[in-house]
Amino acid sequence: PEIAYHAARIGLLENLLTGCTTVIDHQYVHPGAEGDLIDDAVCRAADELGIRLLLAHGWADRNYHEPLAEDAATAIQRAKAVFDQWDGHDGRIRIELGPLIPWGCSDEAMVSTIEAARSWGRGTHVHCAETAIEVEMSLEERGMRHVPWLQSVGSLASDVQLAHAVWLDDDELDAIAAADAVVVHCPVSNMYLASGVARILEMRERGITVALASDGSGSNNRQDLFEAMKVSVLLQKVHHLNAMALQPEDAIEMACAGGARAFGEPDTLGRIEVGREADLIVVNLDHPAVAPVHRVPSALVFNCAPQHVRDVFVKGNAVVRNGQHAGVDIAEAVASAKNAAKTLFQRAGIQSRLG
């Protein structure tokens, strides 16, 4: 658990320092007695740093190495324990269930966990059609693509976040729009893994809410929404051979308003308006890499980078000032994370090159 705490702390700290106030963390399966403590460790790190966190307790009950498999009853029980302890904490932490991937989940377990999450007033986070081969697997095994399968188990609704959603046909896009489900778009990860290009223009034309995301460090290396905004626009431009395909304002909307919707708080987060939570960042537009600024949206998306973030506020609280976290020493957090990584490598018997 302490290794998980230090890993979460350095990752969440990176998010804050790069201007991200809100994180959805799809946790993996954590087997064994210590597994129950890992979700708690992640929440502790978020609490300490002052960031918003939606933790989706990951599970899979089939097609996984046996020690990693977790039946629905166990997943619900473990997630509920975390929910009871952390959900609603300081108005910043939310807990829900996160079936890992369609091929890892049985129909019965999906129905049970979705019903459980809804009984708590929370949603479900699931990977959907990330790669072409996963869709082919679903067609071979179930005779249907991912979205029809999600419909068949009652999970396609406005309280569901569909991560990636790359390999979708027109009927699936129509179904997502009709259900008002949210697509979580990870353009850098999709390029990193050569997964494909999500149909963002077609989604937006249908009124589908798209939230912009970085994905995890294992398939991106960075937690950088400035990079994600820029890449999301450029990827659609080159894919459609249309320089006007997606605009900077669209990327900002996906990163902010779309992210708020995915987090489950579309009416309180995501926009600077009277009555909404004061989640704000201050960006230095006078930096040589940015100035002179002719259009602020263009500057934010095409010029700005994490080093231009000066201050970050969450719920009106200044958690980052002048590039430094208000309560956590960055050097100490980095050193602790490196030591935790060394410990993990040693435990796994893997030679580490960490300095």
Image: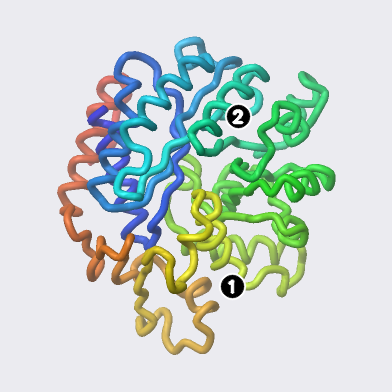
Q: Residue type at mark 1?
A: Pro
Which of these two is toward me, 170 or 131? Answer: 170
Q: Is residue 202 above or below residue 101?
A: below
The residue depicted at 37 percent of the width and 44 percent of the height is 93
Q: Are marks 1 and 2 in contact (CB under 8 Å)?
A: no
Q: Which residue is mark 2?
A: 101
Quarter the N terminus occupies:
top left
Q: Is residue 134 visible?
A: no
Q: Which quadrant of the structure image shows residue 151?
A: top right
Q: Residue type at mark 2?
A: Ile
Residue 161 in the image: state x and y as whole percent. 59, 43
Describe residue 107's horizontal placement relative to residue 54 as left or right.
Answer: right
Mark on residue 165?
none
Residue 252 in the image: state x and y as whole percent. 54, 68
Q: Which residue is mark 1?
A: 248
Which of these two is toward me, 203 or 276? Answer: 276
The residue depicted at 45 percent of the width and 24 percent of the height is 29
Which of these two is toward me, 20 or 122? Answer: 122
Quarter the C terminus occupies:
top left
